[in-house]
Structures are given as structure tokens and as C-alpha cells.
Amino acid sequence: MSDNFHVHNLEVHQTKDIKTENINGELTIIWRDWDKIINQPQMVYLNLINPHEIKGPHLHKKRTSYFYCLEGQITLVIRDSKMNYHEVTVNSGEPKLVQVQKGIAAAIVNNSKNISKVLVLADISWKPDDNEMESVNFNNYEWNKWF
């Protein structure tokens, strides 16, 4: 994708009932220490985005963030280091992990009618008063196209 962000395809495995061997669901591997996708995550949290809302844009000065859509659909609007915008849409039916590098601004858009739930992993944990996050403006971005 880019030096600024990357979309990782994740492994999905069907699960089976141990007695009947019937398929009873699936599991998606988001992170394993030996995959080397995330260098020892220090923080994991659930981010809920209300319908027709935008979170951000902002950037993290020290932290790389990884987004996995658990429920619903989101579009990550990412502004790369050359000030170009990229739109990465993922939904709960896709096994994808979106990585946004430290210093790269992004926003999460939920243009659906339902709350979207996003699992976020980070390589550096948030601490009160660390001033690690910086709000930014995407003044020349067409936000109104989403609603």
C-alpha cells in the first residue's frame, strides 16, 4: 500500500464442534506475537462510532495504530506524508487489519445507519497528559460526500 499505512489480510479458520465435526463458526486471527505485524501491542480498546459520525481527524506522534472492524462498516480517511488522501473502507465481513503509521493523520467515518465497532490495537499505550495525539484539519477534503 504505502509507507504511511497498510492493509493486512488476516487468517480466518472455520471452527468445528468437537463431537459432531459440524462447522459451528469461525475465528479470525488479529494478532499473534510471532506474526510480526504489531511489535508487542501495549494497548487494545474498543472504539464505537455512532451512525453518520466522524471521529478525527487526528494523528499520533509516537504510536502506530491498527484497526479491525468488528461490527458494521467504516471508512478510514488517511492523509499521507505527501498530503494525499486515501479512503480505506472495511466492514465486519472482511478479515482486514488497517495499520496507520505514527505521524500520519486519519479519521474514521461511519456513514451507516448503525453503530460501528472497531477494535484498535496500538504499539504504545495512551497515558494521561502525554500530549501524544494532535488534532488536525482536513480542510480540503470533501466530508459532505459521506452524508
Image (cartoon, rainbow, N blue to C red):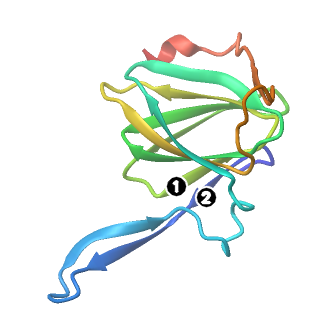
Q: Are marks 2 and 1 in contact (CB under 8 Å)?
A: yes
The answer to whether residue 109 is above or below residue 7 is above
Q: Is residue 119 left or right of residue 52?
A: right
Residue 73 x, y percent position in the rendering: 41, 38
User: Alpha-carbon neighbours of circle 2 within 10 Å: few (<14), some, or many (≥20)?
Assistant: some
Q: Looking at the picture, which amino acid does disc 1 mark? A: Lys
Distance from disc 2 to disc 1, alpha carbons, whole Å, reads: 6 Å
Quarter of the C terminus within the rendering: top left
Q: Which mark is residue 87?
A: none
Crowding at mark 1 (Cα within 10 Å: few <14, some 14-19, many 20+): many
Residue at x 39% of width, y 48% of height: 92
Counting from the top left corner in percent of width and height, residue 33 is at 66, 71
Q: Residue furthest front?
A: 128
**Dividing the picture into quarters, in which one does residue 86 lie?**
top right
Q: Position of residue 123 (x, y in %)?
A: 73, 51
Query: In the displayed structure, does residue 103 sit left or right of residue 38?
Result: right
On the image, the x and y values in percent for residue 32 come to 60, 70
Q: Quickly name the residue at label 1.
A: 96
Closest to the observer: 129 or 141?
A: 129
Going by the image, does 19 lie left or right of 45? left
Q: Examine the image and state in which quarter residue 76 appears.
A: top right
Residue visible at 71% across and 44% down? 125
Which of the pair 4/82 is nearer the observer?
Answer: 4
Residue for point 62% across, 22% down: 56
Secondary element type, mark 2: strand
Name the residue type under label 2. His
Mark 2 or mark 1, earlier in chain? 2
Q: Is residue 22 above or below residue 99?
A: below
**SS label for mark 1:** strand
Residue at the spot of label 2: 8
Figure label count: 2
